Amino acid sequence: MEERDIRRLLERLQAGRVSVPGALERLRHLPSEDLGFAKIDHHRALRQGFAEVIFGRGKTPQQVAAIVRKMLRPKSSQHNILITRADERIYRAVRRASAKAKFYPLAGAIAIRRNHIIAGKGTILTLSAGTSDIPVAEEAAVTAKIMGNRVETVYDVGVAGLHRLMEHREKLTSARVIICVAGMEGALPSVVAGLVAVPVIAVPTSTGYGASFGGLTALLAMLNSCASNISVVNIDNGFGAGCVASVINRL
Amino acid sequence: MEERDIRRLLERLQAGRVSVPGALERLRHLPSEDLGFAKIDHHRALRQGFAEVIFGRGKTPQQVAAIVRKMLRPKSSQHNILITRADERIYRAVRRASAKAKFYPLAGAIAIRRNHIIAGKGTILTLSAGTSDIPVAEEAAVTAKIMGNRVETVYDVGVAGLHRLMEHREKLTSARVIICVAGMEGALPSVVAGLVAVPVIAVPTSTGYGASFGGLTALLAMLNSCASNISVVNIDNGFGAGCVASVINRL
Amino acid sequence: MEERDIRRLLERLQAGRVSVPGALERLRHLPSEDLGFAKIDHHRALRQGFAEVIFGRGKTPQQVAAIVRKMLRPKSSQHNILITRADERIYRAVRRASAKAKFYPLAGAIAIRRNHIIAGKGTILTLSAGTSDIPVAEEAAVTAKIMGNRVETVYDVGVAGLHRLMEHREKLTSARVIICVAGMEGALPSVVAGLVAVPVIAVPTSTGYGASFGGLTALLAMLNSCASNISVVNIDNGFGAGCVASVINRL
Amino acid sequence: MEERDIRRLLERLQAGRVSVPGALERLRHLPSEDLGFAKIDHHRALRQGFAEVIFGRGKTPQQVAAIVRKMLRPKSSQHNILITRADERIYRAVRRASAKAKFYPLAGAIAIRRNHIIAGKGTILTLSAGTSDIPVAEEAAVTAKIMGNRVETVYDVGVAGLHRLMEHREKLTSARVIICVAGMEGALPSVVAGLVAVPVIAVPTSTGYGASFGGLTALLAMLNSCASNISVVNIDNGFGAGCVASVINRL
Amino acid sequence: MEERDIRRLLERLQAGRVSVPGALERLRHLPSEDLGFAKIDHHRALRQGFAEVIFGRGKTPQQVAAIVRKMLRPKSSQHNILITRADERIYRAVRRASAKAKFYPLAGAIAIRRNHIIAGKGTILTLSAGTSDIPVAEEAAVTAKIMGNRVETVYDVGVAGLHRLMEHREKLTSARVIICVAGMEGALPSVVAGLVAVPVIAVPTSTGYGASFGGLTALLAMLNSCASNISVVNIDNGFGAGCVASVINRL
Amino acid sequence: MEERDIRRLLERLQAGRVSVPGALERLRHLPSEDLGFAKIDHHRALRQGFAEVIFGRGKTPQQVAAIVRKMLRPKSSQHNILITRADERIYRAVRRASAKAKFYPLAGAIAIRRNHIIAGKGTILTLSAGTSDIPVAEEAAVTAKIMGNRVETVYDVGVAGLHRLMEHREKLTSARVIICVAGMEGALPSVVAGLVAVPVIAVPTSTGYGASFGGLTALLAMLNSCASNISVVNIDNGFGAGCVASVINRL
Amino acid sequence: MEERDIRRLLERLQAGRVSVPGALERLRHLPSEDLGFAKIDHHRALRQGFAEVIFGRGKTPQQVAAIVRKMLRPKSSQHNILITRADERIYRAVRRASAKAKFYPLAGAIAIRRNHIIAGKGTILTLSAGTSDIPVAEEAAVTAKIMGNRVETVYDVGVAGLHRLMEHREKLTSARVIICVAGMEGALPSVVAGLVAVPVIAVPTSTGYGASFGGLTALLAMLNSCASNISVVNIDNGFGAGCVASVINRL
Amino acid sequence: MEERDIRRLLERLQAGRVSVPGALERLRHLPSEDLGFAKIDHHRALRQGFAEVIFGRGKTPQQVAAIVRKMLRPKSSQHNILITRADERIYRAVRRASAKAKFYPLAGAIAIRRNHIIAGKGTILTLSAGTSDIPVAEEAAVTAKIMGNRVETVYDVGVAGLHRLMEHREKLTSARVIICVAGMEGALPSVVAGLVAVPVIAVPTSTGYGASFGGLTALLAMLNSCASNISVVNIDNGFGAGCVASVINRL
């Protein structure tokens, strides 16, 4: 029941075609979301310009392609479509649904761009500490791009070789939001956050072995950062980091 | 060694009062931060307008008061001063150092305001799930205020009584950044983040007992949120949440 | 805004004293809970006849007494009042607010009975494995009583002395819901659940030392029970067990 | 040794064909369960009408089929048979043992219905937070059905999109027992339990990644729920939830 | 109902003073433990000659003394009495109940010996790795003594100074059961078990700091011992180790 | 260097064929184990009659067979040979090395019996709580048998069906050592230990799912047993339990 | 920008071809690493003579070979090249890039020696407790060798058979640095460190099962060693241990 | 029994005053350490020149003073004495035993210097990340000093303010061993180790709150360092770090 329906009900009440108790009854059974939640939800979609997102893992190529086809149907909608945790096989199925589909093998992501609007006000910089953190960093970068942001990436700038990070000092200081991806001891966000005055989104990765405990160590380290402009997302959650950075960059 | 000193060195070289090798030598031993890091650091201070912060726990009232006095000396500086994890005894000592000191008992914080500049562009909304989460929420709120933000607070809106949260829907939708403080199952940020399109900073608290494991449960729950505009800070880290929100709100 | 207010609005629309857009506007800003949530909430209160509950820990005797006084004010309400995690000092303060207040030292609970309605259809049996589990078992028992149930208790029937449990076999088979409180290895619920055909609410306690890890061991053991009519609440959560048992016993 | 045997023994004693010491001796070595436990066990079977259950994982299709055949032999018994954690290969083997066998691929369960008695007094509602929680929810639903309950299911109603849950408010309020299946942050049970007055059985699932730790996060969150009509079963234990709900619904 | 009662029942049946159905009825309601469990329990007491044991922690001196008095009443019983986790204050109260009470301050134990029977066939040797493990080792030693064993103790023989352990090689090889108490890395049992051919009971202690995690590290290390004649009891459970050793030594 | 060699050295000194400094020198470089450790080690072998043991996991069939061949060479030795964590492929390779090799598929063990001496004084009873615990129980049973013990086994006697355990009460009371294997909530050892007066070796298994955490739950439960004649070995360590029981049974 | 460039800038300032503000500007944007970090980095390379290292896991044979080819290009460089966590397939690819490549299958390492300089002053002794710890010990040994050290290895000297360790006492006392590799209870480093006066690098391994928790138990045990000349590296980090030992041995 | 005694025994054998069996017997019972272990132990003492160390925690001032007095008795010994985890009260007691006793309140240590020999070849640099890490850093520094090393300290150089660390670059590059103390995210050792070519001993501290888990986070981070010249000691183990650094610095 949309606003139009409520308006009609009130008009019928005004016109005497429905009694007050009758109108009251209909209103009482009105699902709350029609008045409140759904609207918020709608507004969110409008304001955020978020891409439609499909979590690929655990779905068959056919299932993903079917969801994509359904999303493509409302032609007027111009939202970009992002499929995360995808692979070559999913890509081939999606490719048949849309010729615009593009595969990012490093990120394990597929994107279908229906618009190239830049909604983010500044640049989102994505850093990775090691080479094995790149897939997660790429997922974050692709996510942020599809959601309408300018994105720069600098990889392999771990803290045990500070000079490599320092070479990119200008990129650090010109970014509006920084995503910092690191496994093992997860120290990069602390060092980076100490060098800038913008929000740093820290993403622990499950790289490493032994006492890295699947990224738990990096996660805990980031939560305990001695820098105060850091917040953290889940292990390997490049997508989440891209979203949070995107939401911030649109402010 | 500041820029002024380097300039002077170059002038002396130009004037022939120091040789090229001599100047080179002095430059070589120049602490790198004078050229690079410190400047970044300085810029950060300027841009952020961050308050000077003292972590009160583990310090005697005398130690805190001494640090405060040192901070107050450069009269030209107009940074606000914030002391977190403080108590009545620390307050009495600080009060003697500055009559402007104000104690926030709920937050366990002391503030000395030297400016009332509002640097944040929107409102930061601080929510707490339960009444026992209020101290952490207050620490976040006081921090954000001292750092130059308009702050609103809504407390005791846990997810097992959704209607209490819904009463404040307008505050939710008008905030530019939301800080969401919750212990126990830590579910509030997920619900809130689903209702808004702005960044939500989730703060787990150590309230609860048994399998709350000192806030670990709430922390893990927040990191696993099914909403994508959430990032998380350490358990009980109201100060960090206030900082992150503040950095975002200045963008 | 209650139903009465909505009715009035509709009458004014019918009477032509407010326009359709005006009514629509007022309805749009209607807090959703007035239509939906609050009603559910109200119904819940009516159906459940739940006692009003105050979590005593972390509150001063004065604070608890003040809340009690506020609860007592609506004289028409006949809900019982339960204060959990309370002590002698809180009791003395509450006693001044209501002469009906009764202290259960073992349970650490205070109850003010305003009705003695029995809403539960059968008997709730509360078992404890060891003597040190009794406080949690008592909290469960007092909670269930105050919420209108017949309650029986059998204590110190740990699994290493099965004959003690077997002596009470008739109570086991005549109960409608069983609350089973155990620390250490938490084995009692499995044994009990194998002997009965009714729901068993398992409550781990933080008794024990060393590798009992504050009740974690008992909690995990109960979650892994090989019996299939067991569900579990938080460590030391006698109150929660009493509530769940009460909700079931009213069905 | 059944009651019949004991009666016969006593008759022989009465008839003088056995001495008192001889009768005493036989009684002394009487397995205790014949007098006590087994009877309870028997009563349980009668009252509960529980399906016979086979845990399929770790068994070969041949082993499962053999157990099924043995269960089918006592033709008079009309218990339903449920095989959990089963797959297509097990199904094919069981199908040869009974043409009535039906495979529920989503639930990974096989059922052989020998009766369609409805023993549960109300409806059991099974909710899932995400699409990846559906297998566990289906296992719960199939279990509850086979045990003689009316079951309804509502899937994909996670707390970050409250309006989707609210659309089903009527189902929520008309259920007698609710099973709530959720992974990740495990927040759904808290929200649901706040909206109803019936017991909510919370089932954490191992979906998610990173800091979801195989369902541990959801489990802990549910144990710490701020709602008081929730109890919890093991991670992914849809079967257990179906059993507990069934036991409650027969009360 | 004891055997005597059953005999009487059978005699009355034989004598025709009770009917078969009447006797059957009485037998049916016979608590199973009268026939089975209690007897086993009785036998256990007879065979084990276990001391009566009171866990002192969490009990007031008055409570402990009252239990002791009750235990002392059946004068014919000659079981020794052991109170673990006791202190000076408890001792003073117990002393008033029995002049035989003896306090072992290191062990935190009180013993009332009513017999000095040696039931153990060999010597139980109690080793401790460090000086701070001595209280737990003493608890084990006192327990074993009170339960009727010859006990020897060797303390402060940690593995980082093997020569200290080697000085006592003869005691190692002449013991029938060895209790090995160690905190920190918990390595002593592995080394000792490699030197002997008798069972080694390993007791982890909560001594140490940092990553000793309250004895968890020592516990885990002992469970992973590369020696195969080791079994483990709970952290700080000197009493349990003494019991297990005692049960073995009576074989 | 064995005792014989030392004796010869002393005789040569006595005979004047070696000087005091020369003898001293040889003695000084004497590996300590020749005097001390090796002897102990040797004695252990003699007294224990332990089988030679090969841990099969991680070794190729060829490697295992090679070790077996080497063990078989000293024909005079009559130690049995046990290979744990073995499979069909290893068995085929070992079979070629010794026609006496026998495969125990349930236990995943291979045994080569070279003697059938019964060194254990009583019977070792191996219990398992569930059917999926049988492989670990079988490993324990085979180990104990190969080490010269009479072994009895009773499987599938979990605590949720006490009557099944009670049927075997006579076996319980006649065993000299009991091995108790259980996964999930690990409650069986507590119940069993309460029924007997002999040592109970508890073996947690990694069966179960979700919050069983690979056997950790069962392990912790067993360590916290309220019975005092229980000690515990590592998760799935059937071999270790068999060894400990064997060492005890030889006393 | 190297020192040469700065010199040139200063000369141009001296020569009047650049103004003071111009020089200042250039210096201000001078990447700090050109003056500071890079130089340190260079010195480190010179002094350490560290091999170039490639972490093979997660890289394709082609990727590893490509990196190797790039490293081999600067012919003047004589650093050795080490590839860790490599396998036969990687080896075959690397072999085509350099005929000097040598595969160490036990260590899972490939080395290309371009120099045989011995930079370490003494011998590094690598010990392993069990046979399954050998791969990690070998990784440590190969790493230390390639970095220019004399290395000795002694394997299978676990603490449950002290005599095997004692046989190698001379190697223990003659080593300058000891690497001690152990899984399970991780006790070897404590025993070894008590016998020597040199630094012991402890390496936990992930061997074992059950409560070894992938090496966590060994790691924790080593961190809690009662010996004081021990420090620890990550689980299975043979490479790290080889590096630390190498850095120490060059002092 | 020392070498002298063995020599005498052999001479008596040679002189015919003892028989071969008699000598053999005496040798057999010779404590192994007299031949082997003790010697090693003695050599260690000579070479290491380690201070005698007393762990103060858990000891009364009287106990500590008594141990000190005993250590002071052998006047010829010139070992320094170190008491760790001590306080003012212990100091006053020790002061009465030796006027040379000096209290280091920050380190919580007491030292009695009997020699000022510098045995370490270079300088040990102790760094701390935060001000609250200073006590542990001081314990390390005092330990290293008492063991005969030149020690330098630089405090409060956390990674979120790199310029503070860089100011001390010369100290970093001139140290022979570096001790790096850090709590919270434990990132300092990684950054420092990347700047130097000497061994870095990382010491995690229990400072921090929430997800720092008493230093576990810092410990795990250090174990996962991406730098390869780092090894780690236990949480808060400043003493251990001082020892390890000292052992290395004597090489």
Image (cartoon, coloured by chain):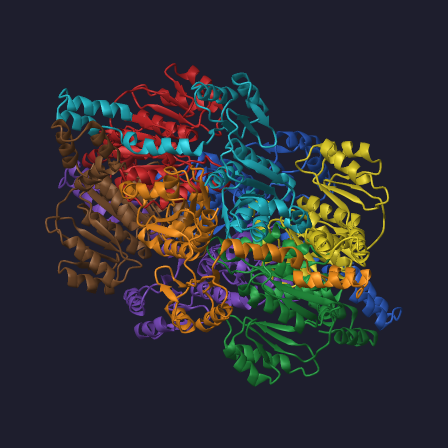
Chain colours: A yellow, B green, C orange, D cyan, E brown, F red, G blue, H purple
Q: Position of residue A48 (x, y in %)?
A: 77, 54
Would residue H141 be found to the left or right of residue D191 on screen?
left
Residue at 47% x, 66% y: name it: C58
Residue G99 or A237: which is nearer the viewer? A237
- Is residue H83 at all visible to an observer of this figure? yes
Q: Position of residue E11 (x, y in %)?
A: 12, 30
> Among all residues in the image, which is located at the extreme right?
G17
Q: Position of residue E141 (x, y in %)?
A: 23, 50
Residue A209 or D188: which is nearer the viewer? D188
Q: Where is residue A9 in the image (x, y as percent from the top left)?
A: 78, 53
Figure label count:
0
Q: Considering only vertical position in the picture, is G139 above or below A120?
A: above
Residue H79 or D65: which is nearer the viewer? D65
Q: Considering only vertical position in the picture, is F107 above or below F96?
A: below
Residue G230 or G97: which is nearer the viewer? G230
- Is residue G178 at all visible to an observer of this figure? no
Q: In which quarter of the image is residue F192?
A: top left
Q: Considering only vertical position in the picture, is C239 above or below B73?
A: above
Residue at 26% x, 36% y: name it: E29
Q: In which quarter of the image is residue G128?
A: top left
Q: Considering only vertical position in the picture, is A62 above or below A19?
A: above
